[in-house]
Image (cartoon, rainbow, N blue to C red):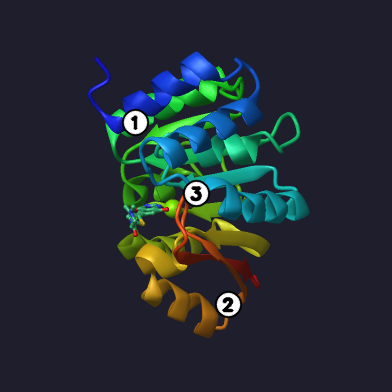
Amino acid sequence: LCQTKEQRILDFVLKNAVRGDPQSVIDNIDKYCSQREWSMNVGNEKGIILDNVVKESNPSTILELGTYCGYSAVRICRLLKPGVRFFTVEFNPAYAAVAKQIIEFAGLIDKVQVLEGSTGDIIPQLKKKYEVDTLDFVFVDHWKDKYKPDTQLLEKCNLLRKGSVVLADNVIVPGAPDFLEYVRNCGKYDCTNFPSFLEYMDEKDALEKAVFRG
Ligand SMILES: Cc1cc(C(=O)N2CCN(C)CC2)sc1-c1cc(O)c2nc[nH]c(=O)c2c1
Ligand SMILES: [Mg+2]
């Protein structure tokens, strides 16, 4: 009955991972996607870099653009202290449905709010509707053409403060050249590139960290 790849990933996690154990959820998604069906989770190589950037930022309010199956939501939230708030935006309702179940199985649903809709609509609602002051950490992993406009929207909505970390996946593959050019040259960010590999492949990819100067 699992008609979609995302449902098959969920099924594999429910069968093989340990309820309430985020690491086993991460390990089983990686196992399925490296052995059976490739899918666009950030993966373990880039995931370790993500872990390290999250640990050093020690964020309290986090926004993720692009939930997909919830792999990076589980990856990030497993590192967070109690009481932090994690918002993740997913445009595709089928992906959001799978992600909620995977996040719940990992035991992290109390920290996470999965917001269904487009980032262009949801970002302007974060202050008033979701009582966000500013964001400590933003993981950008939705659609390459939205990276730059959504970063500019975060600025416009005053959601970034001095030291806010914007970490973007896939700046090589599929690539976000206009985003890279913007954050590296607009004068508002201190940027660092982290070379790595495309999830489950030998192809080169990278993460870009852009720290808002305020
Ligand atoms: C869909 C896709 C295909 C890729 C590729 O080069 N491939 C060659 C090799 N074959 C096997 C796999 C596919 S890379 C990629 C991708 C990867 C992410 O991490 C993404 N993150 C967020 N949003 C995206 O749209 C997103 C797309
Ligand atoms: Mg990605």
Q: Position of residue 188 (x, y in %)?
A: 58, 77
Amino acid identity at mark 1: Glu
User: 123 or 200, which lies in front?
Assistant: 200
Tag 2, which secondary structure? loop
On the picture, is 51 further left or further right than 186?
A: right
Tag 3, which secondary structure? loop
Tag 1, which secondary structure? helix
The crowd level at tag 1 (other Cα within 10 Å; few <14, some 14-19, many 20+) is: some
Q: Is residue 149 visible?
A: no
Residue hosting label 3: 42
User: 123 or 170, which lies in front?
Assistant: 170
Amino acid identity at mark 2: Lys
Say which quarter of the image contains residue 174.
Answer: bottom left
**Disc 3 from disc 2: Cα separation:** 26 Å
**For the residues carrying marks 1 and 2, which lies nearer the camera in this image?**
1
Amino acid identity at mark 3: Val
Q: Position of residue 102 (x, y in %)?
A: 48, 24
Residue hosting label 1: 6
Q: Which mark is residue 188?
A: 2
Q: Which mark is residue 26?
A: none
Residue shown at 47% from the left, 39% from the top:
88
